[in-house]
Image: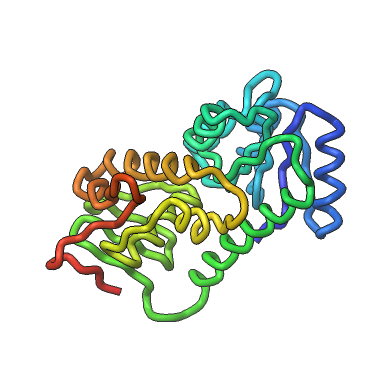
Amino acid sequence: MSNEILIVDDEDRIRRLLKLYLERESFETHEARDGHEAYKMAMEHDYSCILLDLMLPEMDGIAVASRLREHKETPIIMLTAKGEETNRVEGFESGADDYIVKPFSPREVVLRVKALLRRTQVAHTEQSEPHARDLIEFEHLVIDNDAHRVLADNNQVNLTPKEYELLIFLAKTPNKVFDREQLLKEVWHYEFYGDLRTVDTHVKRLREKLNRVSENAAQMIQTVWGVGYKFEVKSDNEPTQ
């Protein structure tokens, strides 16, 4: 698996700082100064992760992430000085997997990158190892964890890494209610930082993607008002693994 990181920021100082800290951890870094350059590079090469500034010349980070998500599922961590809730939600809706507000600690960025790559590496390793097929099957939804593929009523659903992690975490424990803090800790692995709206935004995107091909599959992800979310199945539709 690639160990290459694309750093996208129009500030030379930010790029140099991230490059320094990432290369200390043996990552290979590439740089882009504007949105058009970033999109072109991301389409032509498979990076492990993209650190993407929101405010960019030529094409902003939201547009880059949205266009990239039409073709690729490369993990994206959004970097921006805009810390308002609306900007965070917009970043996640465009396809970002994580969001860090400037000014940030470069060490925190490195830790977030490493955590994201660790989870991605585990998924790829599990797919390559010979073992009984890892399937979670419901009437309207099948999760093939070996192929990292989701089928809703026999239609493939393309999910980002974080959307997939969220779906499989919920589906492995049907009818159990998880509050937002639990999901943030278990899926995003945040214990001391993180925005609860992150969970809401990803659930919304996951439902929308499922609903495009199967309303029944989308309805399995239920909101428990005032608490959180659950993956709801009827007693005669228990999963098989």
Name the residue rendered at 43%, 55% in the picture.
Answer: 166
Task: Locate residue 134 relative to residue 24 in the image: left or right.
Answer: left
Q: Is residue 64 above or below residue 231?
A: above
The location of residue 73, given as percent across then percent down, is 52, 46
The one nearer the camera, 183 or 93, is: 183
- Quadrant holding the N terminus: bottom right
The one nearer the camera, 223 or 10, is: 223
Q: Residue furthest bottom?
A: 131
**Picture mark count:** 0
Q: Is residue 150 above or below residue 6?
A: below
The location of residue 170, given as percent across then percent down, is 36, 59
Q: Residue furthest left?
A: 236
Visual colour scheme: rainbow
Task: Locate residue 173 relative to residue 123 in the image: left or right.
Answer: left
Task: Locate residue 100 relative to residue 74 in the image: left or right.
Answer: right
Q: Residue furthest front?
A: 226
The location of residue 36, given as percent across then percent down, is 66, 25
Name the residue rendered at 75%, 31% in the picture.
Answer: 9
Task: Locate residue 82 relative to residue 137 in the image: left or right.
Answer: right
- Quadrant holding the C terminus: bottom left
Q: Is residue 67 visible?
A: no
Name the residue rendered at 64%, 59% in the picture.
Answer: 115
Q: Is residue 163 visible?
A: yes
Name the residue rendered at 12%, 67% in the picture.
Answer: 236
The location of residue 229, given as percent across then percent down, is 33, 52
The one nearer the camera, 31 or 60, is: 60
